[in-house]
Image (spheres, rainbow, N blue to C red):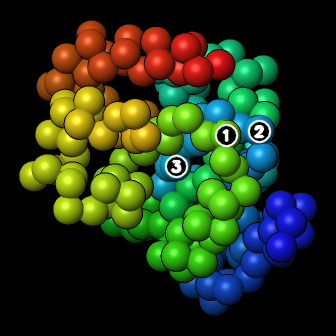
Amino acid sequence: MSINQLIKKVSNCNLCEEHLPLGPKPIFRIHPNAKILIVGQAPGTKVHETGIPWNDESGKRLREWMGLDSKDFYNSEKVAIMPMGFCYPGKGKSGDLPPRPECANLWHKKMLHHMKEIKLIILIGKYALQYYLGERIYTNLTEAVRNYQKFLPEYFPIVHPSPINKLWIKKNPWFEESIVPELKKRIHQIL
């Protein structure tokens, strides 16, 4: 299957439609020339409405952490975006529900097959870390992020840039002091 056929197929996916309160609307960006891949969680309501990935406060902070302006961030020949769940999963008690598990299992390997130029995969949040790092995740997300060097050069794990994580960021100042500059440096070396 060509990358264009795959994009069309994923864009029309309705596999878990019955579980999606706003209906299926897969949001992702892939390109065979992409150098960096962002694997996040799942789109929120604002992203679902606009169809633009990371088009919210989380995305603004992520672009700051990456040291990229919107032009480079949304250039799919540079940065691909492939969440764990491609559609908005719905609201839970303390925020959005976890990403639907069907997407990563069904689509990630097929998409990665077409992106052979990827030099760095940025894993954002616990679902991406658990899926891609499995047993190597350490005891928790904080320890995996703190020990990001162990996963290089392929993966760079980071905490989710959501405003909900303000307290985590405040409790862990080392993240923005030492990890974010390393992330920016690697991204700029690649791009």
What x and y, as percent, mark residue 46? 66, 47
What is the CA distance from the residue labelled 1 to the residue labelled 3? 16 Å
Foreground residue, 155 or 143? 155
Q: The C terminus is located in which quarter?
A: top right
Q: The N terminus is located in which quarter?
A: bottom right
The residue sitting at 81% across, 68% down in the picture is: 6
| Residues at circles 1 and 3 in contact by the CB criterion of under 8 Å | no
Numbered label attached to residue 117: 1
The residue sitting at 37% across, 63% down in the picture is: 131
What is the CA distance from the residue labelled 2 to the residue labelled 3? 17 Å
Numbered label attached to residue 33: 2
* Residue at mark 3: 39
User: Is residue 135 visible in this depiction of the protein?
Assistant: yes
User: Is residue 48 visible in this depiction of the protein?
Assistant: no
What x and y, as percent, mark residue 61? 50, 24
> How would you rate the neighbour count of disc 1 (Cα within 10 Å): few for under 14, some for 14-19, many for 20 or more?
some
Q: Earlier in the sequence, mark 1 or mark 3?
A: 3
- Quarter of the image holding residue 17? bottom right
Farthest residue toward the left? 139
Amino acid type, label 2: Asn
Residue 30's place in the image compared with 59, above or below, is below
What is the CA distance from the residue labelled 1 to the residue labelled 2? 6 Å
The residue sitting at 37% across, 48% down in the picture is: 125
The residue sitting at 77% across, 46% down in the picture is: 32
SS class of the residue under badge 1? loop
SS class of the residue under badge 3? strand
What x and y, as percent, mark residue 15? 67, 86
Q: Earlier in the sequence, mark 1 or mark 2?
A: 2
